[in-house]
Image (spheres, coloured by chain):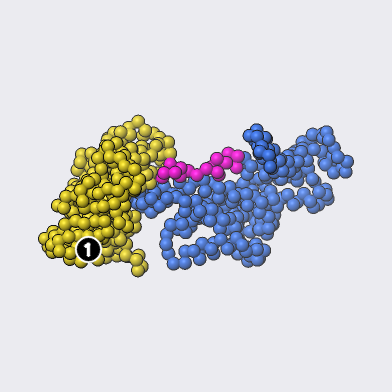
Chain colours: A yellow, B blue
Amino acid sequence: MAAIELQNVVKRYGAFVGVREFSLAIPDEEFLVLLGPSGCGKTTTMRMIAGLEEPTEGRIVIGGEDMTEVDARDRDVAMVFQGYALYPNMTIYDNIRFPLRMRGVPATDHDRLIRRAADMVELGAYLDRKPGALSGGQRQRAALARAIVRQPQAFLMDEPLSNLDAKLRASMRVQIKHLQRELRATTVYVTHDQIEAMTLADRIVVMNQGAVQQVGTPDEIYADPANTFVAGFIGAPPMNLIDGVADGGTFTAPGVTAPCPATLQGKVVLGIRPEDCVVGGGNLTGSVYGVEPTGDMTYLTVNVGTRQVEVKAARDFRAGLDTPLTIGFDPRRTYFFDGATGQRLRHGS
Amino acid sequence: MARRSRSERLWLRYLILFTWAAFCLVPMLWFLSIGLRPRTEVITAEPIYWPTWSLDAWHMIWRDWPMRAYLINSLMAIAGSVVICVGLAIPAAYSLARYEYRGRDDIGFYILSTRMMAPAIVAIPIFFLFRNLGLLDTVWALMLVYAAINLSITTWIIRSYMLDIPKELEDAARTDGASDLTILWEIIIPACRPGIITAAVIAAIFAINEFLFTLLIASTPAAYTLSVALANFSGGTDGIIYNAIALVAFIAFLPVFLVVLMIQKHLSRGLTMGAVKG
């Protein structure tokens, strides 16, 4: 396996900027997740690492070698696609064998390697089937086996789970993480699903509109978001962001009052996570819009002023529509962002 | 309108399908029946409900007439032209479907536009071309002409199938280490096999019916195909030999009919099923 380095990588399509000034060092064996909404440039970034797109500017270094000009077929990275991309005319066995044949692995080793890869994804019983005869989960496991059968420099995975149903997605997620640790494989994983990103990643790169918003461990991204975009993207439901005014140590917005650092002045955005809110207390005043029990907790949506605030309430919380109530939170759990730029305003700064 | 019951609807459906099938097939059976009757019976004015069967025409075309040679000419010209045509159409279609280069769409349209031209316009130049090449009156010339006529339509059929192949398949093959030619050969061609077969069948049908250029190039029986040879029955001292014409026409129709029967599942069903989530 190998480290990957992106140096000032830019991708432009005419006047449109797909990826702007992307620089990142991915150490060997890291599981890196590129996270962002569709069209944010995460897939383009991955395709540039794979060699399927050429960067407009910048260098891409894999395993210490400059690969910027090297064709995809000579880069020695393995890629898993959202649509599986299994070769429909070949059996699963021949699908997994394809990269071995293309890379000139001695034919005598093929059978052993194919069976080992298939066993790792528990697909040993399906080797003589065609992709059309497999379920979605099996096809994705076959695509994984095709990627792991040779020892590539790195794995690239482009939304590999998004075509699967929720239950299968959760079990495949664990399997992918296990495989990555077992193979100690440098992995770049693209997703728009923040749960996948949080559960899988050693580090997350949050992207939006072609630009990197924040790079950090899942804990850092969750606990210390750099701006309103990251704060509003991470968490389920994500952080509540409330536009208001700070003046003399108090933040106010329609239906909201909260203490804030005395240094803050003017238009700011208050951020508070749904899990840090409690029913009762005196920071927010509003009325019930919706109550969604899930068993282990209850999602509560409250109309506050002209906006809605999400709260994770106790599992037995119930209330009728339009019931007036108040919401409170620990001031130490609040975040403040610049009202104009959305950048984080650090407490005391 | 009153609702029809399920069985009524099924009945109606079968009735429509049956009518259509009869409309298409009865002329063929009629040809066969004419071909298997004595010549005298074919030309009487009175309707005949209980025909007398006879193999006169059958014996005639094989014994008194070089049927075997014409059949071989036809089959060679068709097979050769289909091989040449599909062999050229596949790379052309792949280039039109997947590569981006200046003028690509214009080239695509140019290829298609050759089909729109009236054949008579190029008949004379083609005659001189093949005369200068010394290919007049040979099956090789027929192969080349049929291939040229069919190249546009086969290229476009195959191209449309290639456009339906997910791009991801090629990306996967490329990261797996495959070259462009390997991708074409091992991934693209198998995945658009139904399209290639469809194109080949259509090319064969056009080729077997081709008349104008065959007549132009084949001036002696050395290169006659069935379609041109058929015209010979209508001249000479014997008058028009209807039963032989019908039988030869039926024999000319049979190979294409059988081929289509054998491959009809490919004509209607895509092979990319299962490649990506359907």
Figure label count: 1
In this view, the residue in front, B231 or B193, is: B193
Name the quadrant containing residue B146.
bottom right
Q: Residue placed at 29% from the left, 44% from the top?
A: A299
In this view, the residue in front, A172 or B256, is: A172
Q: Residue placed at 59% from the left, 54% from the top?
A: B143
Query: In the current view of this chain or complex, which residue is farthest to the top?
Result: A125
Residue A215 in sight: no
Q: Residue placed at 82% from the left, 38% from the top?
A: B38
Q: For the magenta stretch, what is the residue range?
A: B259-278
Query: Is residue A245 on the magenta stretch?
Result: no
Residue identified by numbered label 1? A245
Query: In the current view of this chain or complex, which residue is farthest to the left?
Result: A348
A334 in relation to B34, above or below: below
Query: In the current view of this chain or complex, which residue is farthest to the front?
Result: A324
Residue type for callout 1:
Val
Q: Position of residue B6 (x, y in %)?
A: 63, 34
Q: Where is residue B180 in the image (x, y as percent from the top left)?
A: 38, 54
Name the quadrant containing residue A316.
top left
- Mark 1 residue element: strand
Q: Residue placed at 34% from the left, 40% from the top?
A: A166
Say whether residue B109 is left or right of residue A338: right
Query: Is residue B272 on the magenta stretch?
Result: yes
In this view, the residue in front, A57 or A214, is: A214
